[in-house]
Amino acid sequence: MPVKHESLVHPQGRGGNQRQNCGNVSQQVCLVFEQCARGRSRLLEIYESRDYLRKKVTVFQSLFLSACEKRQSVKSVYIGHYVLPPASVQDEVRNVVGRLIWECEDEQSVAQGCHETQDDFSEMEVSRSNFESSNTDSSEGEAPVCDLLQGYPVTNMQTGYVSMDSLQKYSEVLLRMHSVGICGSDVHYWQHGRIGDFVVREPMVLGHEAAGQVVEVGSAVKHLKVGDRVAIEPGVPREMDEFFKNGRYNLSPTIFFCATPPDHGNLCRYYKHNANFCYKLPDNVTFEEGALIEPLSVGIHACRRAGVALGSTVLICGAGPIGLVCLLVAKAMGASKVVITDLSPERLTMAKDLGADFQLTVKRADGAQQLAKTVEDMLGAPPHITIECTGVESSIQTAIYATRSGGVVVLVGLGSEMATVPLIHAALKEVDIRGVLRYCNTWPMAINMLASGKVNVKPLVTHRFPLEQAVEAFDTTRQGVGIKVMLKCDQSDQNP
């Protein structure tokens, strides 16, 4: 299917203002980050392009302009057309086209092998020539491996086209993105280029707290239709391994996850995702609430892992977005008393408004055992459960000291790889220490919580920005201002 390209446009001037006439197009803006040489400065910039989204076409195109020092593991890149098929379906694509075009070694041969198909776009001029020497294994008369790949530009670019109609079991949907929340991990990748073992080695689109509207459906999709509003679960298993079979697919080492290297996120105008991990939103649940299902799911998974039940007493360390959703879920699951701690009085005020029974302002000089005694005094006894949401070493120590014998400490926050903790103290009290990795099987429960009114996440959104102001939005999150910053991706609808 031929597609006419438009030269890259950089709204801040670096790309110039020249645009080719692309006819009837849908505009797409993608967010990427640029890390300068030696890591001395870091920028978030918006790059604008135009892209055909009709006829169920998957397009990937990137122009690599420069690279930072190898030590930084980050490339500087301007991204143009960008609707990349998730890795979860790339194997299926390979079965149809042989190889993805960005895997081919000889760009010129691939370009020559791609030829034009007659359809609604036949009026567009696309260069074509006969397939020659790049597919030496193909017998005469057979279709070349790139038979479905059209109009490949060869000047330092990579572009792939695959017709969804040609994939008999295609189970994706194309979404017009509406609301995407900024997570602390997005900011961390922007600032540092890595989180633990997840290192940004190639250009990466950010964003994984998202909701949008279906504009195209694959032929195998039965539960969604064009016009449906959906919340996106960003983690999609790539294979049916033991974790998938046990219902704990979040632990699969090969899982696709939005905005986690090397997988791309969904902070853009249009995005494709596995339909099985898109959940239809009820009419009384807004797009922003749909986007907030992602952090709410962390709270659900943490409370499940902790065993929160009717009458539980709970200590939550940290009143940031994750601590607050853990508070909301714990109360919804029946916790009788919840203490929440934080350095910020403003965040503790928000926690009080959301239902926290006790708020404890922490000072950096406070000792872990001292804070544990204060929590016990507030509750009248040590808590059954502590949910640690900061990742700070001293806070983990407080969690262990504070939890009653036979209780549970759940570690949600991610800090340094190594931490000094009173492990023998935990062992002698038989305190179970449990980890949390994202979530699994939480979206249906979260949607029911929101639709029924049992949980209200609307107050968490304190700042909103259009996608064009993403730099300012990210800087607001970096500075710790407010609670949740939401980016609005649909130019025609900036409502919640």
Image (tube, helix red, strand yellow):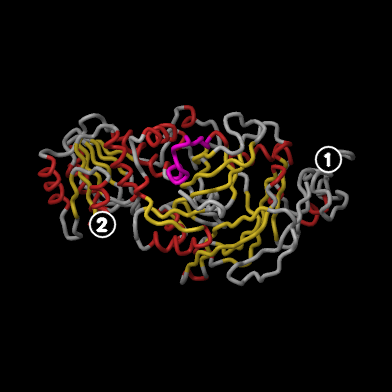
Q: Three-letter amino acid code at disc 1?
A: Ala
Residue 28, relative to residue 241: is it above or below? below
Q: Quadrant of residue 363?
A: bottom left
Q: Nearer the viewer, residue 106 or 6?
A: 6
Residue 182 spot, x, y in % from top left: 44, 53
Furthest residue in direction top, as rendered: 245
Q: Residues within 10 Å of mark 1 (few under 14, many from 20)?
A: some
Residue 424 part of the magenta segment: no
For residue 418, say whether it is visible. yes
Q: Nearer the viewer, residue 146 or 454?
A: 454
Residue 327 spot, x, y in % from top left: 28, 42
Residue 395 spot, x, y in % from top left: 24, 51
Residue 281 part of the magenta segment: yes
- Identify the secondary structure beneath mark 2: helix
Q: Three-letter amino acid code at disc 2?
A: Glu
Q: On the rendered structure, is 468 left or right of 295? A: right
The residue at 23%/29% (across/down) is 310
Q: Nearer the viewer, residue 246 or 45?
A: 45
- Identify the secondary structure beneath mark 1: loop
Residue 375 spot, x, y in % from top left: 15, 45
Q: Residues within 10 Å of mark 2 (few under 14, many from 20)?
A: few
The residue to which callout 2 is attached is 346
The residue to which callout 1 is attached is 143
The residue at 51%/51% (across/down) is 261
Q: Quadrant of residue 346?
A: bottom left
* Label drawn at residue 173: none
Badges 1 and 2: C-beta atoms under 8 Å apart? Answer: no
The residue range painted magenta reads: 277-291
